[in-house]
Image (cartoon, rainbow, N blue to C red):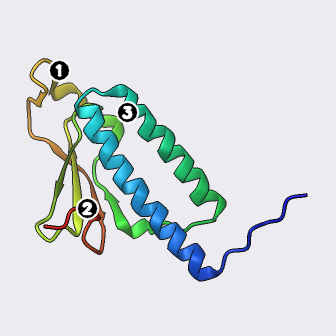
Amino acid sequence: MSEELKLTDELKKTTCKLLEGLMTLTVHDFIDQAEKENWSLALSDVRALNTMFTLSKNLNCEMDPEKVEYLYPKEACHPKSFRIRYTDDRKHMLIFCCPKEHWDEEKKVCKTSIKLHSIHHMGEKILGMEE
């Protein structure tokens, strides 16, 4: 007979915040690996994200919907065109992409202006991005 693990509200909140941060970092790594066309590592990131998502769902984590603003649909972006930039204070991550029809596969550049796909409001400095 299995016993259910009881988490205090504080421990649950801390675990959920940690999972949210880890998912963000894993997305960064996935995009980096995809840019390098290292598909085996990119696939490992996807598997890790699925596991973290399942954990956060099982813990009933409430991810802050205000943290991410989606401005351009990912379906309209070429999958190899995503680029990440950070604001000077490292509190916001900007993800850009190129519309599918404007991506130059040979040169790996956008033939037109890139679109701001999303803004991730991190609140604190992004882990590992200290100066």
Q: Is residue 73 visible?
A: no
> How far is mark 3 from mark 1, CA to CA?
21 Å
What's the residue at 49%, 44% (across, down)? Answer: 48
Inspect the image, locate mark 3, and give the three-letter code of the amino acid beneath it.
Answer: Leu
Q: Which residue is mark 1?
A: 105
How many residues crowd mark 2 within 10 Å: few (<14), some (14–19), many (20+)? few
121 left or right, relative to 87: right
Relative image position of residue 25 (x, y in whole percent): 35, 54
How many residues crowd mark 3 within 10 Å: few (<14), some (14–19), many (20+)? some
Q: Please tell me which residue lies in front, 103 or 24.
A: 24
Q: Which residue is mark 3?
A: 41
> How far is mark 2 from mark 1, CA to CA?
31 Å
Q: Please, what secondary structure does the residue beneath circle 3 have? A: helix
> How far is mark 2 from mark 3, CA to CA?
20 Å
Relative image position of residue 120 (x, y in whole percent): 30, 61
Above or below, 5 against 74 in this view is below
Residue 28: image tag: none
Q: Please tell me which residue lies in front, 16 or 105.
A: 16
Q: Please, what secondary structure does the residue beneath circle 1 have? A: loop
What's the residue at 38%, 49% (across, down)? Answer: 26
Relative image position of residue 82 (x, y in whole percent): 23, 40
Q: Please tell me which residue lies in front, 6 or 76.
A: 6
Q: Which residue is mark 2?
A: 128
Q: Quadrant of residue 10?
A: bottom right
Marked residue nearer the N-terminal end (2 or 1): 1
Inspect the image, locate mark 2, and give the three-letter code of the amino acid beneath it.
Answer: Gly
Marked residue nearer the N-terminal end (3 or 1): 3
Marked residue nearer the N-terminal end (2 or 3): 3
Inspect the image, locate mark 1, and give the three-letter code of the amino acid beneath it.
Answer: Glu
Q: Please, what secondary structure does the residue beneath circle 2 have? A: loop
Above or below, 96 against 103 in this view is below
In the rendered view of the protein, which quadrant contains the N terminus?
bottom right
